[in-house]
Image (cartoon, grey):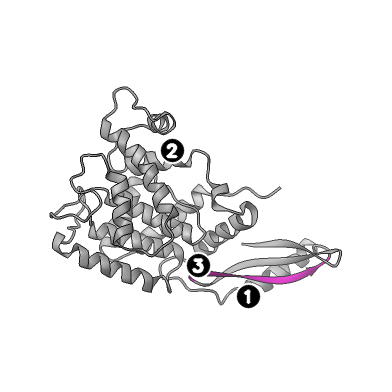
Amino acid sequence: MSFIEKQKHGGHFYFYLVKNIRITPTKLKKLRIFLGRKIPKQKELQKYFVELEKKAMEQYQTRWLPKELVEKVDDLSASITVFHKTLTNVLPKDFMVRYTYNTNAIEGNRLTLRQTALVLSDRIAPEGTRADDVIEALNAVDAWNFAKSYKNKLNKKYVCNIQYEITKNTSCRIQGNYRDNEVRISGSEHVPPKSADVTKLIEKLFAEFYSERKILHPIELSTFLHNRFVNIHPFTDGNGRTARLLMNWVLLRNKFPPVIIEVSNKEQYYNAIEAADKGDQKPFAIFLANQLLSQYTLPLPS
């Protein structure tokens, strides 16, 4: 998306036609065309748009995301920086309630959205609710706050601490460490690796993450980390919730807002994971990008 930028120099205002393009997985560059002290009329301005698009043709090539989708998500990130300054400013007020409700409901938590709001606001258990469901809601906030504020390298301690925050005070048998038993994923054809192989596979994932970080677009990097993590399924419980937090951790570190995978999209979400288990990461990357765009459609600045 191109936009008109206004700058002041020497007491006068000047206008530029601007487009953000990605030149590396982590760097955006502004292409500018000088318009003058007045915005040209529509017919002349259209010529500048065409010229700018030609300059933007040689942009960063993604692995799984189509060009038009990359432009949209990069425009979203740039718009947040320009108009909202920080990612915090763009989050809806009920973000934590909706995130907690959806990420837990995907895993079978029985609290309604309304009950989740009551638990988080009043820290009391609504009548008739299960203790574990209430504890999981409170844990989700602790896990979110821990995961998003982490600034160091991706490692075992970090992911195990996330899982601990998610499962503490619940019936989960192993909290804060990898599983020691074999598991199956309900409703999935994928069979996770043996428990004896988990440590080796997770360490390999960490190494691959830092290698892929130099190549993949941030949406694709989030996709890669999420899908490889759930494929390994390193914990007895909390794998999906940990994977979604890791996914959002990558987004936040790359100046993208966090995504809520809504329980209403559970089937589409699982289908994309199934495709990744079979070697096709593209459906999940496109799903994630579209979720991001649908949740953060920004109004035009006044």
N-term mark: 1 or 2? 1
Residue that badge 2 annotates? 97
In the depicted view, which residue is nearer to us: 103 or 59? Answer: 103
Position of 188 with respect to 44 (left or right) is: left
The residue stretch that appears in magenta: 25-37
Residue placed at 50% from the left, 67% from the top?
67
Q: Which residue is mark 1?
A: 54
Q: Secondary structure at mark 2?
A: helix
**Residue tagged by mark 3?**
67
Q: Secondary structure at mark 1?
A: helix
Dot 1 alpha-carbon crowd within 10 angstroms: few under 14, some 14 to 19, many 20 or more: few
Camera-nearest residue between 35 and 170: 170
Q: Earlier in the sequence, mark 3 or mark 1?
A: 1
Q: Nearer the viewer, residue 51 or 295?
A: 295
Q: From mark 1 to mark 2, how far is it between C-alphas? A: 44 Å
Q: Residue at x 31, y 39 (%)?
A: 136
Whether residue 193 appears in magenta in the rendering, the answer is: no
Quarter of the image for residue 277 reads bottom left
Vertically, is 93 above or below 225? above
Task: Give the distance between the C-alpha atoms of the residues marked 2 and 3, in whole angstroms.
Answer: 33 Å
Q: Residues within 10 Å of mark 3 (few under 14, many from 20)?
A: few
Amino acid at pointer 1: Lys
Q: Is residue 275 above or below residue 241?
A: below
Q: Are circles 2 and 3 on residues that touch, CB within 8 Å?
A: no
Residue 215 lies, in percent from the top left, at: 43, 73
Q: Amino acid at mark 3?
A: Lys
Q: Quadrant of residue 16?
A: bottom right
